[in-house]
Amino acid sequence: MDDGVQKEDRTGVGTRSIFGYQMRVDLSKGFPLLTTKKVNLKAVIIELLWFLKGETNIRFLVQNDVKIWNEWAYQIYLEQEHLLEKYPRYSPEWKAHMLEFVEKIKTDDEFAKKYGELGPIYGKQWRRWAGPNGVEIDQVQNIIDLIHNDPTSRRIIISGWNVGEIQELIVNHHHAPPPCHTLFQFMVINGKLSCQLYQRSADAFLGVPFNIASYALFTMMLAQVTGLQPGEFIHTFGDLHIYNNHKDQVNEQLSREPRELPKMKINPEVKNIFDFKYEDFTIEGYNPYPPIKAPIAV
């Protein structure tokens, strides 16, 4: 708010933006879930499990009552069915029709298969990266193998920026955006696993609290299944911004004094990263201020 510059952006909303910023979180000091506003931890966990499944269809999310990707799928549907003019974004008709759309995704297999798909986003790149000659690469399994077999490696990396495959996301603004959390690297030092994320574009108010919690949790899960302790989560930003229509909400959040961080308990019986379920996670001591709502810029 103090040092950002006014900048136009793809959405047309406009932002206050800083290019290049970094923060570090010691995961031994508590789970970094914001206390100055309540964060929907269920959505964080379900979305992360969705990524790890390699899925790119919103059906798993909506069946678990997680709504954070609905709008992208709905906009693709409106575009494909030539309904963009009939349902102007955020109009009462648009909101009512989107609820019908989501319910149909939840209950109709064929409709979900056709209209729930978001394209080659995170899950596709993490688990089914399109390599040469049609070979699919499981980047998550690869980093687990590296941690087990070569823990001093400087190549324990997952990339979401598969340029040839995500070009459709880059050029088509009605579709889901190309990966914002673009590349992340793990490092093993003194029996501790740390993660550094490079995030090319970061919505400081709405998105970043999710991203912090998600990658901190992923680091803890990965540490557990590889027999390590969690170390640091390092968050490196490209364009870190506050949308112009979030300023009042940001000022309200800044007026709140942070509280003690909660603890995350993970079921110690789970030894395979792909076996985790929502019920394997318990947050203890989370005492946040009330949530603060704000519109997402699409």
Image (cartoon, grey):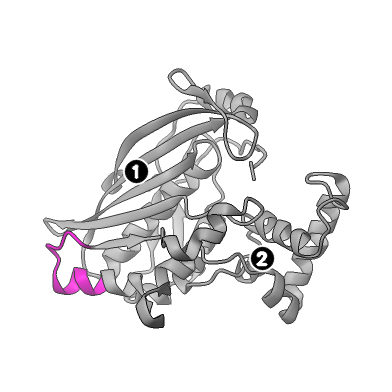
In the rendered view, tell whether residue 218 sits above or below residue 251.
below
Q: Which residue was labeled with disc 1?
A: 235
Q: Which amino acid type corresponds to the residue marked 1 in the rendered image?
A: His
Dot 2 and dot 1 residues touching (CB under 8 Å): no
Q: Position of residue 140 (x, y in %)?
A: 34, 70
Please state the extent of the stretch shown in magenta in the rendering: 144-155
Q: Is residue 240 visible?
A: yes
153 in magenta? yes
Residues 2 and 224: in front is: 2
Residue in view at x 85 percent, y 54 percent:
96
N-term-proximal mark, 2 vs 1: 2
The 10 Å Cα crowd at callout 2, few under 14, some 14 to 19, many 20 or more, is some
Tell me the quarter of the picture where residue 32 sits.
top left
Q: Which mark is residue 64?
A: none
Q: Position of residue 155 (x, y in %)?
A: 21, 62
Q: Position of residue 174 (x, y in %)?
A: 67, 53
| SS of the residue under disc 1 | strand
Tell me the quarter of the picture where residue 225 sits.
bottom left
Residue in view at x 39 percent, y 32 percent:
19
Q: Position of residue 117 (x, y in %)?
A: 63, 69
Residues 284 and 178: in front is: 178
